[in-house]
Image (spheres, grey):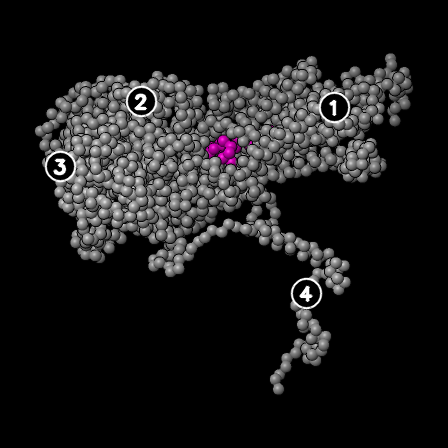
């Protein structure tokens, strides 16, 4: 019996017989080359969307929230739906970086950089909504607890909206630090390869004087672990707190204790879907198929089918509780307003069920899990479904609450409401395009770290090991 | 030598160094050493930063604090009796056509801003209506005529007087056309004028007359008058189409009387019974204990059948079994209470009213529930008189026409004939205060004062006088019409002098007059009821002349409580007040029954999908209505309580654009359609019931601004009895504790009624010492009229947002009257529930605000801090009662963003004109864009009342022995006294008594443990079904 170095089960994390130099070359190439035509087109569209969003927000700030179609009964609509949606998307990055780092999941290295970037941009987009949904956004600083001349007048620490302020700002700060500290060695690589003065100077500043000394590496590793430790609870806490916005209220359909885990699962679900959408495109456009492999895609699809099913169980639990509680108000929200195709917003509930629970079940099939086309299509569907979920929770609960007299007319968004949403897409993709062009989209240092153990190239030199007898190998490597 | 005190040796010896240092004691050097020249100087870092900081801040402050200058001109000499910030109150009288309601005008800084009912009035006891409340806004109407005109050109009073007196002199027959005038001194002025011009006469014309009753009474009693109906003395009330709580004769008075019979106490449960027959759902019909539906043309048959039934004869001529059953039951209920029964009928047909008189005679109503000692002067117009005038004008025998408070060009059914007649009249003079349809046709226009600028008196009922005094100097070059008539009749004194002498002679001199003016009311009448001699001679002729019922679809024209015959059409408060029956604002529409909706509109309300779709989309299907070749198109609303083959349309819409910005929509087209041309003159009276109506569904849709879309408490998951509670009188009599037991059951899982407060929450309840405000609303007394809604608008500067905004569900009312249906889908029972901020002690809105902008006062108020609010709307979402309102746009012009009102609609612009803004209450903050607002329990009034008690050094009085330091606006305006407000911690207060006295007490959504401070008393219905 001879030894086989290559695992029969685990695929290599990096394809192609790469050495360290090639890795650097592959990843830094897009930064050093001129952007492609496709990049320009995409960037132009993103900036246009962003500008439209800016105009939409301008109208809302100057003319009032009446520019949107919200009303006396439906106080939150697309604004908070989009907020929760974006925050949800912003969950995958930190999960991949932090939790998978702590769990020593090597495959995270291929996607963590882009996923973290996505997290940061998504949280930036999410943040726009709670800020600009305010009637008097110029007074938004009132939510900051600081000694002031107004009494001093403090914020209301009982309010879940205030908890949001802390949760999201903390999450954003930690995610940004984590992402940036990971970027330092890679920026230094780009700096060291720079052929123009400007690039050398800018990347020099960005890399904070990284020299690659052992001391730097040691501190870097320690920092990564500390930040990972800090981020881990945040992954769970942020969406838990966002769910409190609803769970602590008295409105049937919002007042639900199941929300925290249900929201967190949903957030991871949608976050991974967004990573898929982006990575399927990025790996193709920048020729990074060797680093973001089909194995990565498959791993993430597994997470999607898992979290999608968790979310599905949550949906069914809600329905069961609505029945079991025998509360007519709860029952109406769930069985009439939601799980009823003929009610005004029935379509959104069934859209959510289909996109989030039923369709992801196709990922039980390995073949479909490994299909790029299916993955891309599914990732879009999942995010549509998750948008529906937030819409269902927010709008179908409040548009018909306790007093039938105040039940709302049909709420659908105005052009400026849609514009704001499109604007955040613009912001997101503008940032992402800039990121893809100017930042190493894959963590070079970390890829190099796993190349030794999990790269395809490494197994080439293993014939010597494979020729040894089991006993000799065991003896040799026992200590 | 002077003693010298010294503090240091330096001072004693006056050394040089001491001199130097004392000179420099407060000297502070420049923060740098300037010896080496400024540029080379060194500055200590601290100082540098300090000065840098200061100068930057100072520059920033100086640069950014430019505030637009607004000029406020102070009084050079403060007028007597005018203290800035303190309101003056003047008793006066609201007059509109024949309606006269005693009010007290609140005047702040010289401008009237709010009308309160005059509690000294024996008729209304402080009650008002929505129209009374809204009338103060008409004073500041920008569309009012501002000067006299001849042929549309501005003129002076002298010039116009000369022109008119010369043209009147040779004009021939002069006719003074007015709506009902019930002012004795004015009638005196008219007599003087008529005496001066021989051959002249006075014609009274009411837009919607009661000629049928007047003429019938002439036949039956020999008196062309309307008696005083005493609903408070009636134990059984049967109304056949008389909307007496909303528009019929004297609704404010009737509402009060009616509520008296409906208020019940647990010790001695007794209440009146009201049976209503109607064709199109009305406010009164919605309040009835039992309602039966019939065709409009069946009215005659019903009164005849009722007469037979009362006599004990068999009923004939009624095909509908339900209706027949209703008549039998009504007859039984009436005969059971002979002497305490009253039948009223809204028909304008003389024959029908003669039969009604016969019925009332048999029921011994004469002198008991119908008082002939005091007659009602609200309507005196006889349609035939006006029809005669129109004929005369067409014949060319009218030389001059003087129009006063009448607008026949709009309200007369045959406007074309009238217009052609008018063209033949040489001299046409109008006293119209606005360029209404008739005034536009007159060459001389002398705009009349608003009643708040006028002197005068009114005799709403014979012997009951109410006085009018000006509360503001006339805003424009207008003149009271009495002065004009006096001038033209050559009198040397003006109207005020005449009025004074008129009353000084009747009262005890000038002092008596002053006292009467101060009180605002004076009555010579005692409350002894009188009879009239009944003459049955013409009864059989009347029965024979009654028109037989017709077939096919019929149309009934009706008046809305707010808009009336069109008088309220230009008033934004009234237009935006949701109609109590349809919950609709800003339009008229075709009312159809659910049955007709199924056949005509293809909407089946029994199908939840179709019902939802109909409810959630404001765009309603448009129906073409064709009558005798005249076609109009109106959106159709499905209103249960309407006869299956009858449709209804409100009059008062489709007004001329010159009436103001509020009568046109965003496309500058008048809102609604004018349906007066559909009416007809039958047997000398105008009839508003039309047969041979063709309806055709068009494929158009038209948005209707509804403020309530869903009307049922029943859901597929059960009836929401926790929202509002109602029961039948039989149930209540059997067990007065039904409501208590129901509450006990609801709260059983949370500690039961006794321990709910403590055990319903994991937190301990707070002590509530001192004052604790509370409100109790008796749903049995409330009839849903909406006076409180408009009173609240006026008191609290609530923005009017216009139809485009109401369509988007952006209405801002702090108080609304919810309306729910239960029972039969075609003819449901209706319950009205006034809904306002419940001021919950455990308020869900308070804990969710991130900036604590809404919080709880120590007196139990849930209060809004507008300048702290950042507008997250979380509180509104979390309010189970949905009473919080958000300022979606810059409705009030109080925003700092320029020109951001440009995108808003006409109505908002109208409300923001400088003139209109004079109506704003300076005690209440005008809310800016982006903040939430809601009912404050009129906190400004509470503060005022507390201050009053404090100044007098005594405890606050909220109803102890009927003494009040304060009343909140809705409570004050309520004609039914359904709302009680006060200090709950005071066991003697009215609110404490209201709560402790009634087992009907409940809190809406009590099980939520939000602990509201507003309670309701359950509605009890004296229904035949279960009785």
User: Label 4 to label 1, Cα distance in Å?
Assistant: 67 Å
Chain bearing tag 4 is B
Magenta highlight on residue B319: no
Pair 1/2: label in front: 2
At horizontal 69% and vertical 22% (from top left) the residue drawn is: A281
Looking at the rendered structure, the secondary structure element under dot 4 is: loop
User: Any mark on residue A286, and which?
Assistant: 1
Q: Is residue B959 visible?
A: no
The quadrant holding residue B1003 is top left
Q: Same chain, marks 3 and 1?
A: no
Quadrant where the N terminus of chain A lies? Answer: top right
Q: Same chain, marks 2 and 4?
A: yes
Residue B840, percent from left and from top: 45, 40
Q: Which residues are magenta?
A: A64-87
Do the numbered discs 3 and 1 sit on residues whose CB atoms are within 8 Å? no
Q: Dot 3 surroundings within 10 Å: few (below 14), some, or many (20 or more)? A: some
Do the numbered discs 3 and 4 sit on residues whose CB atoms are within 8 Å? no
At horizontal 56% and vertical 22% (from top left) the residue drawn is: A352
């Amino acid at each position: 019996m001879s030894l086989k170095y290559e695992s029969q089960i685990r695929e290599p994390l990096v394809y192609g017989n790469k050495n360290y130099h090639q890795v650097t070359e592959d990843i830094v190439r897009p930064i050093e080359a001129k952007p492609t035509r496709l990049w320009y087109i995409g960037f132009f569209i993103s900036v246009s969307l962003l500008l439209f969003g800016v105009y939409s927000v301008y109208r809302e700030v100057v003319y009032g929230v009446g520019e949107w179609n919200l009303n006396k009964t439906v106080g939150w609509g697309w604004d908070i739906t989009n907020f929760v949606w974006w925050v949800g998307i912003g969950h995958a990055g930190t999960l991949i970086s932090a939790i998978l780092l702590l769990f020593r999941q090597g495959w995270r290295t291929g996607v963590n950089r882009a996923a973290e970037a996505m997290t940061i941009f998504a949280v930036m987009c999410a943040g726009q909504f709670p800020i600009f949904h305010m009637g008097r956004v110029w007074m938004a600083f009132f939510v900051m607890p600081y000694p002031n001349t107004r009494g001093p007048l403090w914020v209301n620490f009982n309010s879940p909206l205030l908890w949001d302020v802390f949760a999201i700002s903390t999450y954003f700060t930690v995610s940004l630090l984590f992402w940036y500290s990971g970027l330092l060695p890679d920026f230094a690589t780009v700096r060291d390869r720079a052929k123009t003065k400007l690039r050398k100077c800018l990347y020099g500043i960005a890399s904070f004087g990284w020299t690659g000394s052992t001391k730097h590496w040691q501190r870097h590793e320690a920092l990564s672990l500390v930040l990972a430790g800090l981020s881990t609870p945040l992954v769970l806490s942020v969406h838990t707190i966002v769910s409190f916005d609803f769970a602590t209220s008295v409105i049937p359909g919002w007042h639900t204790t199941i929300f925290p885990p249900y929201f967190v699962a949903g957030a991871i679900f949608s976050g991974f879907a967004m990573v898929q959408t982006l990575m399927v495109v990025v790996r193709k456009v920048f020729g990074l198929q060797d680093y973001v492999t089909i194995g990565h895609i498959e791993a993430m699809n597994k997470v999607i089918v898992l979290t999608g099913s968790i979310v599905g169980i949550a949906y069914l639990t809600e329905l069961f509780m609505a029945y079991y509680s025998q509360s007519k108000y709860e029952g109406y929200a769930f069985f009439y307003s939601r799980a009823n195709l003929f009610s005004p917003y029935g379509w959104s509930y069934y859209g959510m069920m289909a996109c989030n629970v039923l369709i992801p079940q196709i990922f039980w099939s390995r073949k479909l899990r490994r299909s790029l086309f299916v993955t891309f299509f599914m990732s879009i569907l999942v995010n549509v479904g998750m948008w529906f979920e937030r819409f269902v929770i927010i709008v179908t609960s409040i548009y018909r609450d306790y007093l039938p007299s105040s039940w709302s007319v049909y709420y659908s968004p105005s052009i400026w409401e849609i514009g704001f949403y499109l604007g955040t897409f613009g912001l997101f993709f503008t940032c992402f395009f800039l990121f893809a062009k100017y930042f190493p989209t894959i963590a070079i240092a970390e890829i190099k770290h796993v190349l030794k153990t999990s790269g395809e190239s490494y197994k080439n030199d293993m014939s010597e090991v494979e020729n040894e007898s089991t006993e000799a190998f065991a003896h040799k490597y026992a200590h | 030598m002077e003693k010298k005190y010294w503090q240091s040796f330096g001072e004693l010896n006056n050394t040089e160094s001491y001199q130097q240092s004392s000179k420099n004691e407060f000297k502070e050097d420049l923060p740098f050493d300037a010896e080496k020249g400024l540029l080379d100087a060194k500055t200590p870092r601290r100082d540098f930063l300090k000065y840098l900081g200061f100068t930057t801040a100072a520059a920033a402050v100086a640069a950014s604090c430019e505030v637009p200058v607004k000029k406020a001109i102070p009084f050079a000499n403060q007028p007597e009796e005018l203290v800035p910030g303190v309101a003056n109150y003047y008793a006066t009288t609201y007059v509109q056509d024949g309606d006269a309601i005693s009010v007290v005008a609140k005047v702040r800084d010289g401008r009237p801003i709010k009308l309160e009912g005059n509690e000294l009035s024996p008729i209304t006891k402080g009650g008002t209506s929505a129209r009374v409340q809204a009338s103060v806004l008409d004073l500041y109407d920008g569309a009012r005529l501002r000067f006299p005109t001849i042929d549309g050109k501005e003129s002076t009073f002298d010039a116009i007087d000369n022109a008119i007196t010369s043209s009147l002199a040779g004009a021939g027959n002069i006719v003074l056309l007015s709506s009902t005038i019930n002012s004795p001194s004015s009638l005196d002025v008219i007599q003087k004028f008529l005496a001066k011009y021989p051959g002249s006469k006075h014609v009274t014309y009411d837009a919607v007359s009661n000629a049928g009753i007047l003429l019938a009474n002439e036949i039956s009693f020999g008196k062309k008058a309307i008696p005083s109906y005493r609903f408070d003395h009636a134990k059984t009330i049967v109304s056949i189409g008389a909307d007496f709580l909303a528009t019929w004769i004297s609704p404010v008075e009737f509402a009060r009387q009616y509520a008296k019979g409906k208020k019940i106490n647990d010790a001695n449960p007794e209440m009146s019974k009201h049976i209503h027959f109607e064709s199109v759902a009305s406010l009164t019909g919605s309040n009835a204990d039992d309602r039966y539906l019939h065709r409009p043309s069946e009215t005659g048959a019903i009164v005849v059948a009722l007469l037979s039934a009362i006599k004990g004869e068999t009923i004939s001529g009624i095909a509908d079994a339900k209706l027949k059953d209703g008549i039998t039951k009504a007859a039984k209920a009436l005969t059971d209470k002979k002497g305490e029964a009253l039948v009223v009928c809204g028909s304008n047909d003389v024959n029908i009213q003669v039969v009604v008189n016969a019925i009332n005679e048999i029921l011994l109503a004469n002198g008991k529930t119908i008082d002939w000692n005091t007659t009602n002067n609200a309507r005196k117009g006889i349609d035939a008189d006006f029809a005669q005038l129109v004929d005369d004008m067409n014949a060319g025998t009218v030389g001059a026409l003087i129009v006063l408070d009448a607008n026949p060009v709009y309200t007369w059914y045959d406007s074309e004939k009238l217009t052609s007649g008018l063209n033949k009249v040489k001299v046409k003079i109008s006293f119209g205060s606005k360029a209404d349809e008739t005034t536009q046709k007159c060459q001389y226009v002398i705009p009349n004062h608003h009643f708040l600028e006028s002197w005068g008196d009114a005799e709403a009922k014979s012997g009951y006088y109410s006085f009018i005094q000006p509360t503001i100097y006339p805003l424009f070059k207008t003149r009271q019409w009495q002065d004009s008539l006096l001038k033209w009749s050559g009198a040397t004194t003006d109207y005020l002098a005449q009025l004074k002498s008129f009353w000084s002679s009747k009262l005890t001199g000038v002092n008596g007059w002053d006292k009467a003016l101060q009180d605002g009311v004076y009555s010579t009448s005692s409350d002894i009821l009188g009879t009239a001699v009944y003459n049955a001679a013409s009864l059989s002729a009347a029965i024979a002349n009654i028109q037989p019922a017709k077939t096919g679809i019929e149309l009934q024209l009706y008046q809305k409580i707010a808009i009336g015959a069109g008088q309220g059409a230009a008033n934004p408060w009234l237009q935006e007040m949701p109609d109590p029956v349809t919950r609709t604002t800003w339009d008229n529409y075709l009312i159809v029954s659910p049955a007709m909706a199924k056949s005509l509109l293809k909407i089946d309300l029994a199908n939840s999908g179709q019902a939802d779709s109909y409810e959630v989309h404001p765009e309603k299907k448009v129906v073409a209505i064709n009558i005798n070749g005249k076609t109009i198109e109106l959106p159709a609303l499905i209103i249960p309580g309407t006869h299956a083959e009858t449709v209804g349309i409100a009059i008062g819409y489709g007004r001329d654009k010159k009436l103001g910005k509020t009568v046109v929509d965003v496309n500058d087209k008048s809102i609604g359609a004018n349906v007066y041309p559909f009416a007809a003159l039958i047997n000398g009276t105008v009839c508003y019931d039309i047969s041979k109506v063709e309806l055709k569904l068009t494929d158009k849709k038209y948005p209707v601004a509804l403020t309530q879309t869903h009307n049922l408490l029943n859901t597929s998951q059960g009836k929401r009895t926790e929202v509002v509670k109602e029961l039948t009188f039989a149930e209540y009599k059997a067990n007065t504790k039904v409501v208590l037991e129901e509450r006990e059951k609801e709260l059983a899982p949370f500690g039961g009624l006794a321990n709910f407060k403590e055990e319903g929450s994991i937190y301990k309840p707070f002590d509530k010492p001192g004052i604790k405000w509370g409100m109790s609303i008796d749903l049995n007394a409330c009839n849903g009229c909406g006076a409180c809604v408009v009173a609240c608008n006026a008191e609290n500067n609530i923005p009017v947002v216009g139809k485009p905004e109401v369509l988007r569900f952006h209405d801002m009312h702090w108080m609304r009257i919810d309306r729910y249906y239960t029972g039969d889908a075609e003819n449901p029972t209706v319950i009205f529930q006034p809904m306002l901020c419940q001021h919950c002690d455990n308020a869900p809105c308070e804990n969710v605000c991130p900036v604590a902008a809404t919080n709880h006062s120590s007196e139990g108020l849930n209060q809004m801090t507008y300048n702290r609010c950042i507008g997250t709307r979380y509180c509104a979402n979390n309010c189970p009662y949905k009473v919080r309102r958000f300022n979606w746009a810059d409705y009030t012009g109080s925003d700092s963003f320029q020109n951001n009102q440009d995108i808003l609609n006409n109505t908002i612009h109208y409300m923001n004109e400088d003139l209109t803004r004079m109506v704003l209450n300076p005690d209440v903050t005008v809310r800016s864009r982006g903040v939430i607002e809601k009912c404050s329990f009129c906190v400004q009034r509470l503060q005022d009342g507390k201050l009053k008690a404090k100044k007098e050094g005594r405890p606050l009085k909220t109803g102890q022995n009927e003494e009040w330091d304060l009343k909140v606006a809705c409570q004050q305006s309520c004609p039914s006294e359904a709302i009680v407000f006060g200090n709950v911690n005071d066991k003697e207060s009215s609110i404490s008594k209201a709560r402790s006295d009634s087992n009907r007490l409940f809190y809406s959504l009590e099980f939520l443990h939000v602990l509201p401070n507003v309670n309701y008393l359950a509605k009890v219905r004296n229904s035949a079904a279960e009785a």
